Image (tube, rainbow, N blue to C red):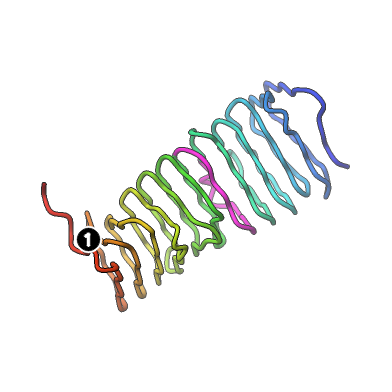
Amino acid sequence: PELLQTGTLTVAGTTALNGGSSAITLVNGANVFGGAMSLTGGDATVAANAPLTFGASTLTGSLIASAPGLLQTGALSVAGPSTLDSGTSAVTLANVGNTFGGALSLTGGDATIVAHTPLTFAASTLSGSLTASAPGLQQTGALSVAGTSTLNSGTSAITLTDAGNVFTGAVSLTSGDVLLNTSVPLVFAPSSAGGALRVSAPGIQQVGAVSVTGPATLGAGGADNAPPRPG
C-alpha cells in the first residue's frame, strides 16, 4: 500500500519503508531522517531539510529526492527516471552497484555518480564539479557544469551531443568512442579515448594530454583550437 504523510517526520535512526509496488510520497520539506533510508516501492518522492542518506533501495518506478546533501550507504536500483536536487550541496552516489534505468537529472553543487549499467543524464545543473563512472554515458537533456568534469565509461562510449551543454571547467574523458558537443569553449584535461573522438565547440583547448586511438574530428566553428598559452 501507498505510504504518505500529513505531518513532519523526524527519525533519529534508520528508516525502512516498503510500499510494495505502490508509491512512497514523503514531501514535507521539514522532514529529518538522521540515519540511512531504505526504500522499496513503485515511485518514491522524498524531501528533507537535512542531508539524506539512502540505504539499499529498489524502486520499480521513479525517484524524486530533495535535500541539502544526498548520499548513500547501499546500492540504489531505480527502474524509472531519477530527479535529485541537493540545492548547492553535494550529490554523492558512488556505490558501484547503482542502477538508474531511466534518465538522471541532477541539481547540486558537486556530483559524484557511479553505476554498473549505462547512465543517461537528463537536463542537469551543477554549481560545482561532476564525476561520473558507468559503462556508457549519454544524455536526453543539456548538462551545465560550472566546475571540472571527470567522465569515465571504461571502454564504452560517451555520447553527450546536446548543443546546449556547458562545461565551464576542464573535461577529463576515459572511454571508447566519444561524441561531445558544447555551447561554450571546451578545455580538455588529461583524457584517453580507445575509439574515435568527435567534438564540436566554439573553441577547443587543453590543459593535459589527449590520447585518441581512432580518428579525431574537432569542430571549433572557426574558433581557436590550440592549447591555451601562458598569460
* Residue 32 picture location, percent across and down: 66, 24
How many numbered markers are drawn?
Answer: 1
Residue at the farthest right position: 1
Label 1's element? loop
The amino acid pointed to by label 1 is: Ala
Side (left or right) of 207 relative to 217: left
Q: Give yes or no for residue 98 being in the magenta stretch.
A: yes
Give the residue displayed 31% in from the left and 64% down from the top.
192
Q: What stretch is highlighted in magenta?
A: 92-109
* Residue 195 picture location, percent across and down: 36, 74
* Residue 14 picture location, percent across and down: 69, 29
Give the residue displayed 85% in from the left and 41% down from the top.
2
Where, by quadrant of the figure, is residue 205 drawn? bottom left
Give the residue displayed 24% in from the left and 64% down from the top.
223
Side (left or right) of 32 relative to 25: left
Residue nearest the viewer, comparing 230 with 48 = 230
Q: In this view, does 16 lie above or below 218?
A: above
Q: In this view, does 91 lie above or below 9?
A: below
Circle 1 is placed at which residue position? 209
* Residue 219 picture location, percent across and down: 30, 71
Looking at the figure, which quarter contains the N terminus? top right
Q: Give yes or no for residue 29 being in the magenta stretch.
A: no
